Amino acid sequence: MESFVHLRKGKTPKRVHADLDGLKDDELGRGGFVGRTANMYRRNDPTAYRTVGPLRPTDVLSSELKPSDATDAHGGPLLMFSNADCQVLLSRRTEEMPFFVRYVDGDLLLFVHKGSGLLETEFGPLRYREGDWVYIPKACTFRQVPDSQSTWLMIQATDDFRVPPAGTLGRHFPFDPAQVTIPEPAPIDDDGREEYEVRLIHDGGPTSLFYQHNPLDVEGWRGDNFPFTFNIEDYTVITSESVHLPPTVHLFMQATGVYVMNFLPKPAESVPGTERTPWYHRNVDYDEIAFFHGGTLYGIPMPPGLVSHAPQGVHHGAPEKARERARRKFDDYDRVDWSVIAIDTRRRLIPSAEILANDLGQH
């Protein structure tokens, strides 16, 4: 139930997420920051806890994970997290695929953390580079030919990924679909091999299909279901001088139960007293994954490739020392130089055994 009545009890600042006077800003909200909300102002850091049990945050350096495609051309990505709506995987391919691949359980979104190369697809070739989002429709056949080792964050939905509905800013902001790169048809001739493997990736699989011709033989196509790339350099960052905006402002694409956001370099909030660091919260309806692509936060380097998972209902947020430093250095920085990919999921995510084995153990 939503209400137009917003109450204020006890000691509270006049502005939301600002002028805390030593208190800790803790948000208990529904619907991923767009539903009913309570902001509680605490004496102590709500993330200063010790966890016993499975519902705990995890932090993993993706460089320590070992997907099999990093060392074996016939290998595949590593599963990191999963639920009924999606899988979150890591790929670090160094050699071209000796097979073709087709994900048949849902659409794919791939974020290129490192590397460059070529995707051969049924629709034509697509070059990829660092900072690219690559969209692959469900059951589209493709093959990866990396120029060098390529690290991908992969999200497979069990539904189709869609551009979110246009809000008050209009349909071109923050993501303008007119800036995507779409492949041109370019059928590939047979190279003399006896057969071509198309590996179907699915629950309970894989399954392999073997053709006597190259499956990328499409002479032309028409329609509105096709792969594309979009680089985060072309994403329009929405900002405010007087308040740190919620993650929902930075929504890029969504599927049922899955929401993908880009947190990118931007001007820092400039009104004195404004809290520039995201407030403590529990985001009780969504699990959150943050993938740190790079950059710094007010002079503090962000570990490239860090994967951080915060389960819904569990407090998370930057530690108090980082918040104190941001306040102390307010006049020293006028930009936030971060690049973070965020994934929110409506259902709880299950960390894989590899994630739990490599957890940095901060909780």
Image: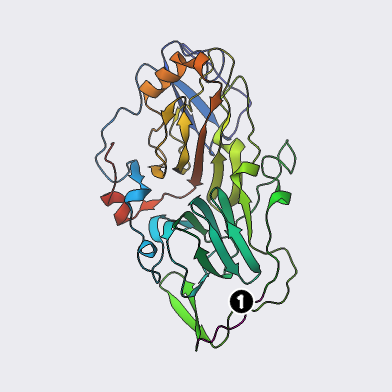
Taking depth in this image into account, of 33 and 245 the one nearest to the observer is 245
Could you tell whether 154 is left or right of 45 in the image?
A: right
One can see residue 302 in this view = yes
Taking depth in this image into account, of 19 and 340 the one nearest to the observer is 340
| Quarter placement of the C terminus | top left
How many dots with numbers? 1
Work out which residue is located at the far front of the displayed protein and give it: 147
Magenta span has 188?
Answer: yes
Q: Few, some or many C-alpha atoms within 10 Å of disc 1 (few <14, some 14-19, many ≥20)?
A: many
Instruction: Assign the magenta stretch its main secondary structure.
Output: loop
* Residue type, numbered disc 1: Leu
| Quarter placement of the N terminus | top right
Q: Which residues are magenta?
A: 187-193
Q: Is residue 178 above or below residue 281?
A: below
Could you tell whether 331 is left or right of 238 in the image?
A: left
Residue 5 x, y percent position in the rendering: 61, 23
Could you tell whether 179 is left or right of 89 in the image?
A: right
Residue at 36% over, 60% down: 67
One can see residue 160 in this view = no
Taking depth in this image into account, of 146 and 179 the one nearest to the observer is 146
Residue at 49% over, 23% down: 39
Q: Is residue 24 above or below residue 132?
A: above
Taking depth in this image into account, of 85 and 2 the one nearest to the observer is 85
Magenta span has 1?
Answer: no
Query: Which residue matches tag 1?
Result: 216
Residue at 60% over, 56% down: 161
